[in-house]
Image (spheres, helix red, strand yellow):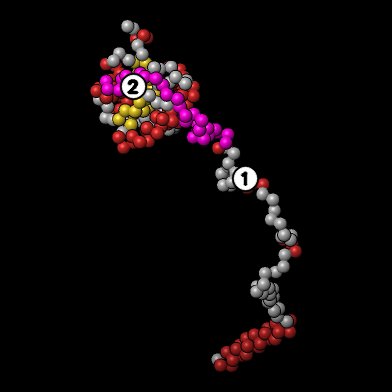
Amino acid sequence: MTATDKPTALIVHGSDITAKRIQTILRTRGWNSTISIDGDKAVDEYVKMKPSMVFMGLNIPTLDGHVAALEIRESDPSARIIFVVSRSRMQKARDAAYSAGAVAVLTTPLTQSDFDQNWVLMNGPVPEAPGLADLDELYPELDEIEEKTPDSPNGTNTGDLPPLPGLPPIENLPPIPGVLPIPPLAEPKKKSRKGIIAILFLVVSGLAGGTIYLLFSN
């Protein structure tokens, strides 16, 4: 059997350890596999590869594993999906498996015996995916999100709001009550010409008197 004749699997998981463990177990069974850590890209990868199985986690970047599984089932109704989760997330994985029509749910840490015990189930009939009916609500279109702008919580643009009704023009607004008008600053008083002449006369008289005193005192 050549490499091109081997069955293929797509592994979509947020844990590198778990993804490589699945890859190792599949290799012992003669399978080829590709690992993806991006939920959105994994959907495109599935369309390109058309693998025989998809091993899917729940906590995946860019796209939740449940939604990614539904996207894959929408592109291919016969897609065979196996959820791989920790025991603490088992109930959520079962709900996602029912919604996306997964064939099995495996828990980590994975062992070879886990695959052996569930291999028949993993290759069994593919159930219906009732969650496809709610896919638009789980993963809304981008144009619906862009209808809301950051300017306003209800999606309206506050840049072009009309003026508030009932307000008169600024020039007709009444004065604010309780605020007294500021009086104009008083101009400095100008000295009269007569006052200046009197001051000069006193200065000259004082100088003349001092001079005469000095002359006679010697």
**Mark 1 nearby-residue class (10 Å; few <14, some 14–19, many ≥20):** some
Q: Secondary structure at mark 1?
A: loop
Three-letter code for the amino acid on which mark 1 is drawn = Thr
Is 129 one of the magenta-colored residues? yes
- Quadrant in the rendering for residue 184: bottom right
- Residue 40 % position (x, y): 45, 28
Three-letter code for the amino acid on which mark 2 is drawn = Leu
Question: Where does label 1 land, which residue?
Answer: 156
> Vertically, is 31 above or below 90?
above
Nearer to me, 6 or 165: 6
Is 165 one of the magenta-colored residues? no
Can residue 40 be seen here?
no
Nearer to me, 93 or 43: 93
Q: Secondary structure at mark 2?
A: helix
The region drawn magenta spans 116-144
Nearer to me, 26 or 135: 135
Residue, x 30% and y 35% (percent of image)? 87
Question: Where does label 2 land, which residue?
Answer: 121
Residue, x 69% and y 53% (percent of image)? 163
Q: Mark 2 or mark 1: which comes first in sequence?
A: 2
- Residue 172 % position (x, y): 75, 64
Image quadrant occupied by the C terminus: bottom right
The Cα atoms of the two marked residues, 2 and 1, are separated by 52 Å
> Vertically, is 182 above or below 218?
above
